[in-house]
Image (cartoon, rainbow, N blue to C red):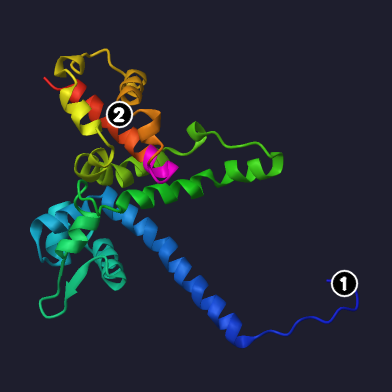
Amino acid sequence: MLHGAVKPSLNPDALNKLLGQMVNDLGAAVNGALVVLGDGLGIYTALADCGPTTSQKLAERTNLNERHLREWLSAQAASGYVSYDAASETFFLTAEQTAVFADPNSPAAMTGGFYGISSVYHDEPLIAESFRTGAGLPWGKHHTCLFCGTERFFRPGYQANINENWIPALDGVQQKLMAYPLSSWRRSSLNLYSMDLICTRLLSRQRFATLRNSKSRTSISVSLRRKSFQVATMD
C-alpha cells in the first residue's frame, strides 16, 4: 500500500461469504482424505457387501477399531457419502453410493479422483521449486497417487464407452476392427508402441480429426490401446 493511501474498509457481508466458501473448501479437503482412507481400508466395499449394519458389526467384519470406524461412518453420513437409519442405528450404502464408492467397474466410480488430488499435496514441494526455477515438472516425477488415481478414475468410463459409443462414432472403424485378423492380436510381443501403430492404421488422420476436441481423441487412443492389449493377451 502506498504511503498515505486510505486502507479499504472491511465489508462484513463479503467477508462472511469468503469465510463460508473457505469453510466448505476445508471440509471438502478433509473429506477427500477420509474417502481415500475408507477406500484403502475396504470399508466401502464391506459396507456394500453386508448391507445395513451397525458400527460394531462392521468393525468385526473389517477387523477395524470400532470407535474410529464409528467416527468415520458418522462423518461420511454427514457428507451424504454413506446413509444412516436412526431408528435401527445402522449404516448402509444406497445403490447410487455403491456405484460411486464401492464398485470399481462402475462408470460412476469416483474414488480414484481423490487419489489423484492427494498427489497434489505430495507434489507441493516439487511444484514450489518449479515456481522458483521456472522449470517444468515431468510427468514421471509426480507422486504415484496421481497414476493410480488417473487409472481408477478414467478406466471405468473408457470401458463403458469405447465399444458402445466411441468406436461406433468413428466412421468405418468398427468394421475395420471386426475385420482385422484375430491372430494378429495374439502375439505376446505386442507392446504399447505396436498398439499405437495399429490404432494409427485403423484411425486415419482424417477420421480422427473429425472428433470435437483433443480430449476425446486422447481418450479414444488410450482406450483402444488398452482394449488391444486385453485382446492380445487373450488365450
Quadrant location of the N terminus in the rendered image:
bottom right
Determine which residue is flagged by label 2.
225
Above or below residue 44? Residue 180 is above
Magenta-span inclusion, residue 214:
yes
Give the image location of residue 234, x and y in percent: 14, 22
Give the image location of residue 71, x and y in percent: 29, 67
Along the viewing direction, whichever of 171 and 51 lies nearer the viewer:
171
Residue type marked 2 = Arg
Does residue 64 appear in the picture of this structure?
no
Give the image location of residue 208, x and y in percent: 37, 35
Q: At 59% from the left edge and 44% from the top edge, which residue is drawn?
A: 127
Query: For residue 126, what is the image quadrant?
Result: top right
Along the viewing direction, whichever of 39 and 218 lies nearer the viewer:
218
Above or below residue 190? Residue 213 is below
Q: At 90% from the left edge and 78% from the top edge, which residue is drawn?
A: 4
Q: Tell me which segment is drawn in magenta.
A: 211-217
Numbered tag placed on residue 2 in the rendering: 1
